[in-house]
Amino acid sequence: MKLYICRGTCQPFCRSLPDDPLLECFTSTDDSSVQVDPSHAEMVKRAITENRSAVNGGFLLKLPFTTIFEYLQILRMIAVSLRSLGPSAMFYLAAAVSDFYVPWESMTMHKIQSASGPLDMRLAQVPKMLYVLRNEWAPVAFCISFKLETDTDILLGKADMALKKYKMHMVVANELQTRKEEVIVVTEQEKITVRRDTTQPGADVEDPLIKLVVDRHSAYIDA
């Protein structure tokens, strides 16, 4: 079972679709009906088939959220609930929800009036919950986090720091401009470069990355 905490339009099985699939993948006909545009038909069919198979088979549960407060509550409930699974549980934390936020106690109760003039807002840093996840909520689960940077000179150093500071089992280091072509998986023992197979049409970097993650998680369970 995969529990997918999601916000917005980014959904499983949809990464090969356009950014706005509803408006770009469908067309209206003369009789006012709607049909899939032939140029996107195969991708739409595959996305629908794979999604329904996962949901109907009990392998995927989507948990939507809107605010950082909701996300942290959901993450905590999932982690505590999965604690009994021990090393069989895995957390694949692919992106930071937000780096900064407005604390609950700082939020205004009513609509901010524009007549009040310029608005100054002070944002607080989102609490770093990876350490809490690893040490309190699910201390035996296998945990993977990601580190995205625009500066390649600091990328691996920050990934190493995250690995040690939060006790992650793997950190996927990816640079903004090349993240769809290659990533570097950082572990305590090694750094593994994972690349998209350019010889295969439609291949992406996620395929070899997920295979590596599954292999390492299986070894962790058996250890």
Image (tube, grey):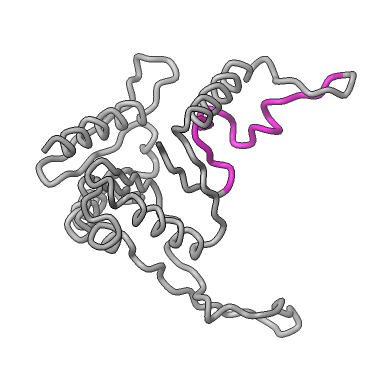
Count of numbered badges drawn on the protein? 0
Q: Is residue 220 left or right of residue 72?
A: left
Among the 4 quarters of the image, the one containing residue 88: top left
Reply above or below: 220 against 48: below
Q: Position of residue 100 (x, y in %)?
A: 45, 67
Among the 4 quarters of the image, the one containing residue 114: bottom right
The stretch drawn in magenta includes residue 204: no
Reply above or below: 201 against 171: above
The stretch drawn in magenta includes residue 21: yes
Name the residue at the right extreme: 31
Name the residue at the front extreme: 84
Q: Main secondary structure of the magenta part?
A: loop
Screen quadrant of the C terminus: top left
Reply above or below: 178 against 36: below
Q: Is residue 70 left or right of residue 21?
A: left
Q: Which residues are magenta?
A: 8-29
Residue at image x 44%, y 74%? 124
Screen quadrant of the N terminus: top left
Reply above or below: 65 against 10: below
Q: Is residue 86 left or right of residue 77?
A: left
Name the residue at the bottom extreme: 116
Residue at image x 22%, y 51%? 168
Residue at image x 18%, y 38%? 221
Q: Position of residue 118 (x, y in %)?
A: 65, 80
Q: Position of residue 206 (x, y in %)?
A: 36, 31
Among the 4 quarters of the image, the one containing residue 75: bottom left
Q: Position of residue 59 (x, y in %)?
A: 44, 32
